[in-house]
């Protein structure tokens, strides 16, 4: 059946809308994408009741009306006049056309979506059309005078009436649907073109990296040559998540932060009386989000927010981060400070929060809106392996039956994802028992509120295959730095932008960061060195500078090319079990920052480098390797 990207139920439809939905489910295969009454969240444009898109058959808009023929007083080419007062209603076919036209005119300005030559030069490379379905009218049961009007203004070509809706079979329906377009092309749209069409229709679903930002005036939106939108599952989730407490548990690269951005913008557009809070644990991520979200959304990393609350409410205590956080949480939980202060709270990196911190945040949600959204991935919990080892119900998050699991990694190539997760599994058990056909997909689960947070495995990469990661063992830290500089120089000569490169290391107290900065400067490679809170807080993508950062600071970011340096800095003899797990998670997080190319370096051998050598030497088809489903 057709792929519906918006929820549709008998309760939220009219009788005729439901009949048409039933017809679509019976007659269209899953290559047809369908949106029902989809809000165009940020552009304010109106869409037809049903929007249908297919890579070969193009874009179709259908308006639905439930009118009684006995109420009709007059019909003409522009309007239908109903009832005693002869109220005028716009002709639904014209409404469908007017809804589509702004998108069509915008897409006709995109060189990738128009015919370059021939009879239709300048026209779109895909067909488009519009029509209407009218319930309550039957062409076979009207008077001769009204039948003349119906045939003239509501012809069988672009209008289905009630009797036709009930009796039409699949071949005739497909013939009618495809006949709504004025012209057709034998070649389907490419994937690049398909992504662009969807980006113009729903720009809020664009999933490009931090370099792309939607303009305020979407009519002047200039899309890059390659644009990526949410996949069907992601878009369905954001359109249908619902109110109340919600939890999204996603593997690294599954688009959690992208979904958070969508919800934050949607909440901001709803104009609540109280502020909206977006909370994360990472300074750099908060900087990125602050630049991408509307001004009426408050974005903080947790300790920054705690410091602000302490000063505003005169909460006494010590001034170190942990003490400030503890004091603020106690003030919220015991004294009622900030209770119900926020209309909506969206929490990214939920795996890094302690139980008391989450409990305090839940208390600050306005009970009238009860809007809370938590994102997490236990595999990325690198601060405290005991975090999220508690039932969500114990901290006041009531999300039973409202937990969504995202298993598909969209960021990394299959090779990077396979190496990263196979390395991870050598040290940390993955007790993910989801199986069956649905177990391999993003899906919604009905979780037991008493259940502790599970660790889930990514089932596949959403990207094409790429280069197998490289591990370079060096004889000294100096050789390691020189190798890194040479590797970056080679990438730059190959056309990679500096801003698409990151060098990540592990220990902020080691000298490696400073040594790398000095070597890069000597080679003329400028870098954003995120070695202090101010630099992290002010981080912004710069095309002429690479990023030099600890792995911890880089969480939530992604780069085309990543060098993960300093694997030898882990002194295995001093690592206890919980510290060992935290170190493994750090390496996993660092590896999964890379989109296309990953290089790992070390100045000394240890159990991590040995394990990586073993993992890298295995064929991707070996047992335990993540295989992309065909």
Image (cartoon, rainbow, N blue to C red):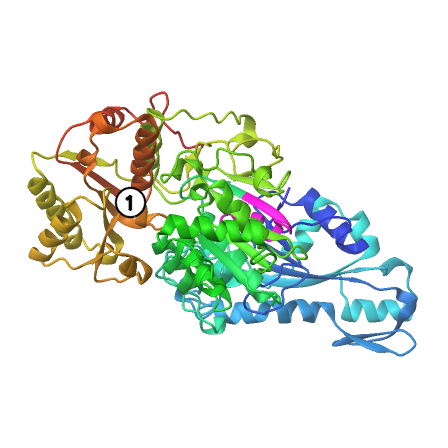
Q: Quadrant of residue 403?
A: top right
Graded by Cα atoms within 10 Å as few (under 14), some (14 to 19) or many (20 or more), the crowding at tag 1 reads: many
In this rendering, position of residue 360 left or right of residue 80 = left
In this rendering, position of residue 124 left or right of residue 154 = left
The C terminus, quarter of image: top left
- The residue closer to the viewer here, 580 or 317, is 317
Q: Residue at x 47, y 54 (%)?
A: 279
| Residue found at the very far bottom of the displayed protein | 85
Residue 576 spot, x, y in % from top left? 30, 27
Would residue 238 be seen by someone viewing this image from the given angle?
A: no
Q: In terms of secondary structure, where does tag 1 sit?
A: helix
* Count of numbered labels shown in the rendering: 1
Chain part drawn in magenta: 230-247
Would residue 234 be seen by someone viewing this image from the given angle?
A: yes
Residue 259 spot, x, y in % from top left? 50, 52
User: Which residue has dot 1 on it?
Assistant: 551
- The residue closer to the viewer here, 167 or 552, is 552
- The residue closer to the viewer here, 435 or 538, is 538
Q: Is residue 529 above or below residue 110?
A: above
Q: Quadrant of residue 607?
A: top left
The N terminus, quarter of image: top right
Q: Is residue 315 above or below residue 80?
A: above
Q: Residue at x 30, y 39 (%)?
A: 591
Q: Is residue 274 above or below residue 19?
A: below
In this rendering, position of residue 435 left or right of residue 457 = right
| Residue found at the very far top of the displayed protein | 623
């Amino acid at each position: 059946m057709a792929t519906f990207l918006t929820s549709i139920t008998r309760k939220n439809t009219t009788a005729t809308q439901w009949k048409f939905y039933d017809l679509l489910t019976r007659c269209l295969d899953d290559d047809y994408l369908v949106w029902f009454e989809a809000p165009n969240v940020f552009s304010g444009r109106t869409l037809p009741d049903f929007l249908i898109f297919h890579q070969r058959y193009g874009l179709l808009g259908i308006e639905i009306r439930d009118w009684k023929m006995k109420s009709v007083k007059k019909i003409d080419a522009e309007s239908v006049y109903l009832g005693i007062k002869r109220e005028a209603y716009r002709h639904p076919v014209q409404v469908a056309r007017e809804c589509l036209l702004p998108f069509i005119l915008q897409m006709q300005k995109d060189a990738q979506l128009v015919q370059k030559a021939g009879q239709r030069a300048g026209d779109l490379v895909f067909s488009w059309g519009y029509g209407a379905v009218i319930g309550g009218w039957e062409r076979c049961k009207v008077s001769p005078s009204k039948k003349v009007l119906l045939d003239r203004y509501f012809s069988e070509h672009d209008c289905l009436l009630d009797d036709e809706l009930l009796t039409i079979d699949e071949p005739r329906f497909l013939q009618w649907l495809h006949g709504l377009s004025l012209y057709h092309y034998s070649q389907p749209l490419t994937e690049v073109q398909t992504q662009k069409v969807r980006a113009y229709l729903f720009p809020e679903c664009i999933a490009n990296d931090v370099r792309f930002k939607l303009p305020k005036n979407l009519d002047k939106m200039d899309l890059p040559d390659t644009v990526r939108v949410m996949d069907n599952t992601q878009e369905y989730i954001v359109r249908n998540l619902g109110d109340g407490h919600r939890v999204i548990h996603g593997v690294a690269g599954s688009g959690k932060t992208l979904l958070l951005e969508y919800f934050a913008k949607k909440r901001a557009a709803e104009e609540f009386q109280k502020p909206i809070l977006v909370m994360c644990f990472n300074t750099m991520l908060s900087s990125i989000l602050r630049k991408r979200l509307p001004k009426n959304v408050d974005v903080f990393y947790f300790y920054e927010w705690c410091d602000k609350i302490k000063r505003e409410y005169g909460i006494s205590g010590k001034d170190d981060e942990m003490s400030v956080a503890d004091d603020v949480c106690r003030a919220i939980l015991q004294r009622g400070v900030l209770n119900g202060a926020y209309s909506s709270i969206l929490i990214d990196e939920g795996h890094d929060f302690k139980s008391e911190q989450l409990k305090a945040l839940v208390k600050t949600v306005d009970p009238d809106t009860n809007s809370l959204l938590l994102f997490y991935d236990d595999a990325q919990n690198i601060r405290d392996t005991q975090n999220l080892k508690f039932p969500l119900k114990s901290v006041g998050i009531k999300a039973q039956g409202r937990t969504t699991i995202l298993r598909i990694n969209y960021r990394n190539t299959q090779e990077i994802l396979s190496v990263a997760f196979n390395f991870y599994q050598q040290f940390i058990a993955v007790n993910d028992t989801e199986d069956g056909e649905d177990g391999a997909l993003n899906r919604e689960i009905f979780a037991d509120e008493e259940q502790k947070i599970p660790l889930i495995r990514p089932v596949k990469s959403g990207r094409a295959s790429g280069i197998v990661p490289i591990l370079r063992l060096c004889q000294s830290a100096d050789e390691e730095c020189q190798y890194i500089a040479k590797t970056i120089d080679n990438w730059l000569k190959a056309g990679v932008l500096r801003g698409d490169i990151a060098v990540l290391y592990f220990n902020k107290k080691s000298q490696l960061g400073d040594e790398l900065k000095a070597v890069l400067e000597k080679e003329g490679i400028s870098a954003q060195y995120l070695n202090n809170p101010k630099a992290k807080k002010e981080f912004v993508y710069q095309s002429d500078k690479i990023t030099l950062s600890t792995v911890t600071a880089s969480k939530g970011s992604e780069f085309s090319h990543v060098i993960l340096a300093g694997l030898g800095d882990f002194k295995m003899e001093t690592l206890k079990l919980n510290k060992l797990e935290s170190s493994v998670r750090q390496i996993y997080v660092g590896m999964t920052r890379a989109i296309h190319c990953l290089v790992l370096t070390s100045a000394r051998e240890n159990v991590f480098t040995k394990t990586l050598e073993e993992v890298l030497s295995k064929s991707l088809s070996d047992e335990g390797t993540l295989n992309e489903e065909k």
